[in-house]
């Protein structure tokens, strides 16, 4: 018989059996038909696949259990999915499955809600093992009777993958080898036993063809596969959500798995003590998931040297040790949800291309990250409590220069501190260069200080500030000495109408013209002249100050000679000081000879100001105008001096 004829015969046989079962349900309970929609999982190439809703037929609840049959979830040429398998219908199931010998088109079988004895369960497995089924999934299994040894025949199978989920063993006392040996020695490529509270699994008794093992959501511990050298073809091992505790023991478990590439140890209780024995990983391991464990910084001392993709998300890592062993092949690193305070450098993994460091404790990320990690193509650093300050400016500038390497920018990058900036996106945070560049700020402050010092120094030199300071000091000292020497004379008594200040080169005019014309006659003006009124033994400055203090007016004979005299400048300064300190109009300026402004030294700025603002008497060259000049001068200094003990003040001098 040809292969095509044999397949056609099996197909018609399968359809006839299914039709008989279906019409049996209809005849028993036509009046109580109930159609509902269900969905269930179905294995296809080792993975789960949701099946859309299909009609589901239940029998009358008063019907005898002996006649209760399974429920068909899916029925196609390649796939069959049944539910509600019990000890009452398992014989019919075995009879049905025995018709699908190797060569038939049925490849996918799914059984759910299975409640049978141990031997019946083994018969189901044995029948499927010798059928055309390649992918077998069985879930929500309850084993009802005692577990006992079973001589399983693994030969001549088409099976490639077995998936078991939610298996419940009701027998509390049995030999574990009788249970685990059945599955450990299976000659298939993929085995999944999940959500079944499994506490152990034996090492295969011979070299195993397993390439994929998934024991997630069980109760496995560090004892699994220790010193097991039979998993020589295993490439993928998933052990997430178990109870593993020692990372070093996990590494030794993999040391004999020569082809292992992917290991998932997430959601366990793993930790690593640096004082533990050295780790020894399988050399072929390139992808490792250690997320959601209890690992700290010491984990970097126990990692596979050839790892390419490493997931350390949701652990307790605070920093990446710089002295760790180099992971030269590492391309992808996930450090999200840890306790890192800064971006790690790439000194130990120079090939890194992808880094996830979201949801850590990073306030101000290092701006030199891309310099130390030149091959990084994507950095996920969002959702950190960023502190928006000057230090963060370099990182923001780095984003602009990175060419879109920051994943999630700008939405995931938000200021957390300070309080007034919370919620502000980093792209909207700006500070001036001067406010953030300490060197620039110091240089600017230094330059401004130097400019200020230069300006002050120039003004001091140009305006002869030191000279004025010295004069002020001498004025103060003289006044202080006078106070201590004659405290009873503090109430000043005017003794002269005017103090005359002039250059020695103009003394002839003063002696021959000024003094005779002012002092002659009844009620003449009393003038204070340094040659006759300075007191011997006192300093010149002190004599000048005393004469100015005892005089009602100060007459200054201005000429080019006056400008060149240092002492004349002293006398002008002290008289000007008196003008402001007493708020009096005591200065009289006589312009003996015209003075060009250009010959007045810069430090004589007070003289320039006085000549510009105050009216002065100009000595006329015409003799006919002299009488008017003297009359105006007398009028300017006209005052009655006080009398002391019945005598004029000048008589006491």
Image (cartoon, grey):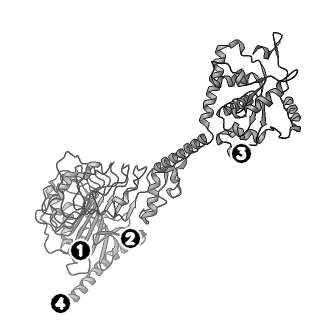
Instruction: State the SS at label 1.
Output: loop
Task: Residue 68: give x, y in percent of width and height.
Answer: 31, 67
Position of 424 compared to 30: left or right? Answer: right
Viewer-closest of 19 and 288: 288
Q: CA distance from mark 3 to mark 4?
A: 137 Å
Which residue is at the far top? 645
- Decide which of tag 3 and tag 4 comes sooner along the chain: 4
Q: Is residue 155 magenta?
A: yes
User: Which quadrant of the structure image shows residue 79?
Assistant: bottom left
| 3 vs 1, front mark | 3
Q: Which mark is residue 1?
A: 4
Circle 1 residue:
134
SS of the residue under disc 3: helix
Q: Which residue is mark 2?
A: 57
- Please say if the residues under marks 3 and 1 sit with CB atoms less than 8 Å apart: no
What type of secondary structure mainly makes up the magenta span? loop
The residue mark sitting in front, 3 or 4, is 3
Tell me where residue 19 sits by quadrant.
Answer: bottom left
């Amino acid at each position: 018989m040809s292969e095509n004829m044999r397949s056609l015969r099996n197909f018609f046989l399968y359809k006839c059996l299914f039709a008989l079962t279906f019409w049996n349900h209809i005849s028993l309970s036509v009046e109580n038909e109930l159609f509902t929609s269900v969905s269930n999982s179905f294995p296809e190439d080792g993975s789960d696949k949701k099946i859309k809703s299909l009609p589901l037929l239940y029998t009358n609840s008063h019907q005898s259990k002996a006649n209760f049959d399974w429920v068909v979830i899916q029925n196609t040429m390649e796939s069959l999915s049944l539910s509600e398998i019990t000890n009452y219908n398992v014989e019919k199931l075995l009879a049905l499955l025995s018709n699908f010998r190797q060569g038939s088109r049925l490849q996918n079988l799914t059984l759910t809600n299975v409640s049978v004895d141990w031997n019946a369960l083994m018969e189901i497995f044995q029948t499927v093992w010798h059928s055309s089924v390649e992918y077998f999934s069985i879930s929500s299994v309850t084993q009802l009777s005692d577990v006992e040894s079973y001589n399983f025949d693994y030969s001549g199978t088409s099976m490639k993958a077995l998936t078991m989920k939610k298996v419940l063993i009701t027998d509390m006392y049995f030999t574990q080898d009788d249970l685990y040996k059945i599955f450990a020695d299976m000659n298939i490529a993929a085995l999944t036993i999940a959500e079944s509270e499994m506490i152990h699994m034996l090492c295969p008794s011979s070299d195993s063809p397993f390439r994929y093992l998934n024991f997630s959501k069980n109760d496995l511990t560090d004892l699994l596969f220790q010193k097991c050298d039979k998993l020589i073809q295993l490439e993928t091992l998933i052990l997430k959500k178990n109870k593993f505790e020692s990372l070093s023991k996990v590494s030794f478990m993999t040391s004999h798995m020569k082809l292992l590439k992917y290991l998932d140890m997430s959601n366990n209780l793993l930790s690593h003590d640096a004082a533990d024995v050295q780790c020894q990983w399988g050399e072929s391991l390139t992808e490792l998931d250690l997320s959601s464990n209890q690992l700290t910084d010491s984990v970097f001392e126990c990692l596979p040297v050839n790892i390419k993709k490493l997931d350390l998300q949701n652990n307790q890592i605070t920093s990446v040790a710089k002295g760790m062993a180099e992971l030269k092949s590492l391309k992808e690193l996930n450090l999200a949800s840890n306790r890192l305070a800064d971006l790690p450098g790439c000194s130990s993994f120079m090939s890194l291309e992808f880094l996830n460091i979201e949801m850590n404790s990073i306030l101000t990320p290092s701006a030199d990250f891309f310099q130390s990690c030149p091959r990084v193509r994507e950095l996920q650093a969002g959702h950190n409590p960023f502190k928006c300050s000057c230090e963060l400016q370099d990182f923001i500038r780095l984003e602009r220069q990175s060419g879109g390497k920051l994943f999630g920018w700008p939405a995931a990058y938000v200021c957390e501190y300070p309080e007034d900036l919370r919620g502000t996106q980093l792209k909207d945070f700006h500070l001036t260069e001067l406010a953030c560049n300490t060197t620039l700020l110091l240089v600017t402050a230094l330059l401004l200080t130097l400019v200020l010092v230069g300006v002050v120094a120039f003004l001091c030199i140009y305006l002869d500030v030191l000279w004025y300071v010295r004069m002020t000091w001498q004025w103060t000292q003289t006044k202080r000495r006078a106070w201590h020497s004659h405290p009873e004379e503090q109430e000043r008594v005017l003794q002269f109408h005017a103090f005359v200040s002039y250059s020695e080169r103009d003394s002839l005019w003063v002696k021959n013209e000024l003094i005779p014309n002012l002092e002659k006659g009844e009620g003449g003006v009393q003038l204070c002249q340094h040659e006759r009124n300075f007191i011997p033994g006192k300093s010149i400055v002190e004599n000048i100050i005393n004469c100015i203090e005892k005089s009602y007016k100060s007459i200054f004979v201005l000429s080019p000679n006056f400008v060149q005299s240092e002492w004349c400048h002293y006398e002008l300064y002290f008289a000007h000081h008196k003008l402001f300190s007493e708020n009096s109009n005591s200065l009289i300026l006589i312009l003996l000879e015209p003075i060009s402004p250009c010959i007045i030294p810069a430090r004589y700025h007070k003289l320039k100001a006085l000549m510009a603002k105050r009216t002065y008497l100009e000595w006329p060259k015409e003799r006919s105008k002299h009488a008017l000049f003297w009359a105006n001068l007398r009028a300017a200094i006209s005052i009655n001096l006080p009398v002391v003990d019945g005598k004029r003040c000048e008589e006491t001098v």
